[in-house]
Image (cartoon, helix red, strand yellow):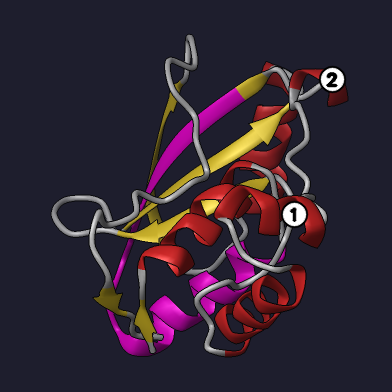
Amino acid sequence: MKLDSIDLKILQELQEDGSLANVELAKRVHLSPSSCLNRVRALEADGVINRYVAIANPAALGLDLSVFISISLKTQSKEALAEFEQRISEHDEVMECYLMTGDSDYLIRVAVANIAALEKFILEQLTPIPGIEKIRSGFALKQVRYKTALPLPATPIKASR
């Protein structure tokens, strides 16, 4: 799918506010409501737009601690990686999980209420996962920047799924 400048404007607006009504979105991108809706549906069908979400405030939910945990596995076998990824995906505290290069096999970010909740997560949820060799964690003292909107190109592109 080729993304033109109007598609990129639609994406920019929806990344800022996914709850925009189609009529308002159409006004902002200077299209008729029907043309705008057709473009949004095409972006969804082609996998450019994956989903729409509401972003909750962690502090309002009592999740005051954001922790980055690096996890090394004993082996890098395909089976060990697949099992770890399946098991780590079962935990709601895990907000992100990345397979890394270098010394650490995985980097996860967890959202928990406090140190006691972190200790419980590590001891009861993380360490029982087979194949873990080393766990290291670091706390976020302050969130300097957080965004969900991806940087969009300034010019039209051919998008890939």
Q: Earlier in the sequence, mark 2 or mark 1?
A: 1
**How many numbered marks appear?**
2
**Residue position marked by numbered label 1 in the rendering:** 53
Residue at 49 percent of width and 46 percent of height: 149
Amino acid residing under circle 1: Val
Residue at 68 percent of width and 44 percent of height: 17
Whether 103 is drawn above or below 67: the answer is below
Q: Is residue 31 visible?
A: yes
Give the left or right position of residue 146, taking residue 65 as reference: left
Whether 15 is drawn above or below 37: the answer is above
Q: Which mark is residue 11?
A: none
Please state the horizontal and vertical placement of residue 51, each as a whole percent of the image.
68, 68
Magenta span contains residue 61: no
Q: Residue furthest left?
A: 102
Give the left or right position of residue 38, taking residue 56 as reference: left
Quadrant showing the N terminus: bottom left
Looking at the rendering, the stretch of residues picked out in magenta corresponds to: 66-90
Residue at 49 percent of width and 17 percent of height: 143
**Residue position marked by numbered label 2 in the rendering:** 60
Give the left or right position of residue 104, taking residue 62 as reference: left
What kind of element bears circle 1? Answer: loop
Q: Give the crowd class for mark 2: few <14, some 14-19, many >=20 residues within 10 Å.
A: few
Quadrant showing the C terminus: bottom left
Amino acid residing under circle 2: Ala
Please state the horizontal and vertical placement of residue 18, each as a whole percent of the image.
71, 52
Whether 153 is drawn above or below 85: the answer is above
Between 117 and 52, the one nearer to me in the picture: 52
Q: Is residue 127 visible?
A: no
Magenta span contains residue 87: yes
Please state the horizontal and vertical placement of residue 59, each as a whole percent of the image.
76, 18
